[in-house]
Image (spheres, helix red, strand yellow):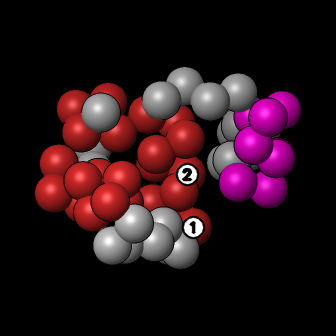
Amino acid sequence: MAILTGLSQSFLSQLELGNRRLTNIDRIVVLLDGIGAPADMTGPMLRLLPDE
């Protein structure tokens, strides 16, 4: 998961244990992108708009 998301293993472990919360929107987007979560399941406001 750390390789997919670019988030540290220790940070992800703390999330799993409930010792940390994912409140930074940038980290949320990185996590969602890293695991390949579809934008229609996460809400379009959490995703960057494609360049026009």
* Image marks 2 and 1: residues in contact by CB distance under 8 Å: yes
- Can you see residue 27? yes
Asked whether, in this view, residue 36 is left or right of residue 45, the answer is left
Question: Disc 2 designates what residue?
Answer: 29
Question: Disc 1 designates what residue?
Answer: 25
Q: Is residue 44 magenta?
A: yes
User: Residue 26's spot in the image, x, y percent?
Assistant: 50, 63
Q: Looking at the picture, which amino acid does disc 2 mark?
A: Val
Name the element at disc 1. Answer: helix
Residues at marks 2 and 1, CA–CA distance in whole angstroms: 6 Å
Which residue is nearer to you in this view: 9 or 50?
Answer: 9
Q: Is residue 38 above or below residue 28?
A: above
Q: Is residue 50 magenta?
A: no
Q: Looking at the picture, which amino acid does disc 1 mark?
A: Ile
Asked whether, in this view, residue 30 is left or right of residue 52, the answer is left
Q: Residue at x 45, y 72 (%)?
A: 21
Q: Is residue 50 above or below residue 31?
A: above
Give the residues drawn in magenta, as a range: 39-46
- Can you see residue 8? no
User: Residue 17's spot in the image, x, y percent?
Assistant: 32, 60
Asked whether, in this view, residue 39 is left or right of residue 24, the answer is right
Name the element at disc 2. Answer: helix
Is most of the magenta stretch helix, strand or loop? helix
User: Residue 46's spot in the image, x, y percent?
Assistant: 70, 54
Q: Is residue 44 above or below residue 25?
A: above
Which residue is nearer to you in this view: 51 or 34?
Answer: 34
Which residue is nearer to you in this view: 23 or 52?
Answer: 23
User: Residue 19's spot in the image, x, y percent?
Assistant: 33, 73
